Image (cartoon, helix red, strand yellow):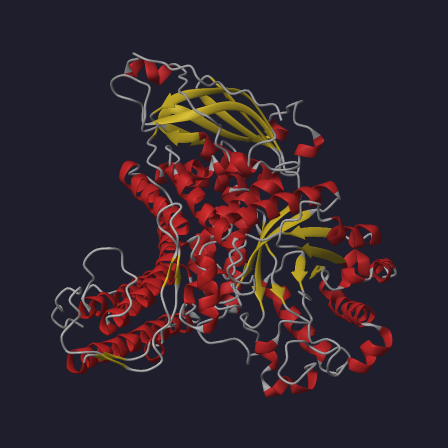
Amino acid sequence: MRLALIVGGIARGLTCATLLFAPLVYAQTAYHLIPMPREITGVEQVPLNSVTVECAGCDAEDLFAANDLRETLADRGIPTGVGLRIVLRRLAEHPDASFTEEMRAEGYTIRYAAKTLTLTGATAEGLFYAAQTAKQMIERWPLQPVCAGVCPGFVLHAAEIHDWPAMRYRGLHDDLSRGPVDTLEFQKKLIRTLAAYKINVYSPYFENTQQYASNPLPAPPEGSISAEDARALVAYATQYHIIVIPEQEAIGHLRKMLQWETYADVAETPHGAVLSPGQAGSIPLIDAMFKELAAMYPGPFLHIGGDETIDLGIGRTRVDVDTRGLPTVYIDYLKQIVTSLEPLHKKILFWGDVAQSDPELLKELPPEIKHQLIAVAWGYTPKPKGFLQELKPYTAAGIPVWVSPSINNYRQVWPNQQLALDDIQEFTRDGQKYGATGQLNTLWNDDGESLANMNWYGILFGAAAAWQRGESSIPAFQQSFAQVFHGDSLGLLNQAQGELTGAMTLLHDSKVIGATEGTDGLFWVDPWSKDGQVMAEKMRPINSEVRLYAERALKYIAQAKAQEPNLREPDAIAAMEFGARRIDFLGLKFQLADEMVDGYAQAQGTAMGTVSVHPVGPRPSVSALLSDINGVNGRLQDIIDGYSQLREMFEQQWDKTYRPSGLRPVLEHYDYTIAQWYARVDKVRSAQRQWSQLRTLPLAGDLGMPAVAQIAPTVPGATPTTTPAATPTTTTVPATPPPTAAPDAPHNP
């Protein structure tokens, strides 16, 4: 990449009039563009207070690009005027020898001279992408200005740019079947945002959430996509040069369809997840759905899924699989499906995980089948040694292949950004190296709790990695995200993202919980349950550090909101704050649970007058210790308040992007968990009454508490405190407290 940046020179003492006409350089550490263009030279900073967008003689597609640019700049507060001219034009009318053949399909040039920024593309796509880059080249004047007197409102990072993509297809795969289903309004926002970062494929994922006239049973009311909405989405996406590729699972992941008795004869196992090969009704069912899909989504591709067919070979096809082998049965079924769909004249995408197990069978596929197929190799965990084994079976067989990394949002209180960025970087790099023609970055909503506005970080890095050549720089992206996406000139939200990444990395590396549950499992687990006690032991050394990461993130978010009055994407910032609060509460819950166990053990020891685990000095009374667990400001109330506040925030986030269906189960989980802690309030309140009336306490186990907790030290080098197990009988003590105890406080449940 040719990159010439002017940095370090600081212009001082310039008047406002001087600023309007003279290039100005202010200190900056990076040129903030996502994706980063292929070639950038001659960067200079040009102050401006107004802009006009011109597209003389343009056709409808180019006028759309010009209007989109004009509206975006107006939304960002840039006045219309003669300060800067942005001119959009086609290469055919303005030949340019530097415009190479590989740039023609989607490439563009940008040049600045004489207060004019000229955007040139050979195609509508190229000119549209030039306009997207131009949006990012204009920023508000930074909050730490280097001018004297009145500063200009905005600055143009002028440069000469030659740019074109590394990969032909750059996409996002959007799970609409595991709880959340986007509203059409949010899907349109998603389309606009994807296009702004040069993504040109959007692939909604359906198990049972696309409505079919031929198959009306599976789609849930208020939680599925109608044919009308599908057609509206395609029409909207077309304006933004995005192909919508619907994925309808056609082999596995069909439990929500096959649970209907109507389909009992085509299920591999009763009410299972796999559509059984060889059953007379299987291919007609697939054929009917995909004919409707092709009419609703008239692009050149259809996606049949086909991953994780775990039931295959254990039911109706058991004898066949035992005789011929699972790969043979699977690939024969794949051929049947492709042959059935051939009249639709579509390229057929399928997940590559099952078929790749027998590369020789792939080589033996007929050429006409290979010609119709595109294998989508997926891998959601970074592989420092590379992804050749996922790609080679298809490249060696002559089958086109795309790569499919993940933003690692599934089953997480906040996406694991480090895993996501490493995975996207490595898989996309290897895809380019070994000839993949596309990237389909994925988001999944496995437990139904993922929130759409938490996902932008991984989505944008996926866009950058697919457009940019070779291995995309993670640090460069991390230093640019907040400036580009949020208009955060100070980069405070980059620091907030870094803190959340630190917290999630610490939780992941500490192996507190298995990957199949993720940090959502930690959020929900009862720390006093059998499993919760095992997790609590692993959490104790990291609780404080995890919380401090989250709290620093909250501080950076607050600072950014206070200091940057024109931040963009406020819903995404609110989602970031929600994620930070969930992480912080996760650690707090484990801390409070330990403290209550410790406090109750102290209360028992004080009641018996024989055990003291409290530091030297006056010991709290039994009533005070119990009130600290359950009282106006008790720890039980803190946990209830925490879950209740997060419940409200979750519902607000959901309503901004999703249809109603799917929300209730998550809210029920909150309500169940809150009720569980309220039940403990009742039990501790009963213990408080028992102490007040009888001067005895029940066993810790009777309150749902474990008897012993290992508390992590809060002071470096300190020795952890171990609370003793409770006496295995109800404790009875004299009515007069031991002499060393402080007087009992009034009962305050």
Left or right position of 426 against 208? right
Q: Position of residue 49 (x, y in %)?
A: 33, 25
Up/down of 58 relative to 515, above or below: above
Q: Where is residue 230 in the image (x, y as percent from the top left)?
A: 53, 63
Residue drawn where x is 56% and y is 26% of the image: 161
Up/down of 556 relative to 117, above or below: below
Left or right position of 148 against 694? right
Q: Position of residue 251 (x, y in %)?
A: 69, 72
Quadrant location, the N terminus: top right
Up/down of 384 relative to 327, above or below: above
Seen from the viewer's position, the closer of residues 161 and 122 is 161
Q: Where is residue 559 in the image (x, y as percent from the top left)?
A: 30, 40
Specify whether residue 71 is in view.
Answer: no
Residue drawn where x is 17% and y is 64% of the image: 740
The part of the image, by quadrant, that contains residue 588 is bottom left
Specify whether residue 50 is in view.
Answer: yes
Seen from the viewer's position, the closer of residues 103 and 31 is 31
Seen from the viewer's position, the closer of residues 574 and 421 is 421
Seen from the viewer's position, the closer of residues 143 and 586 is 586
The part of the image, by quadrant, that contains residue 621 is bottom left
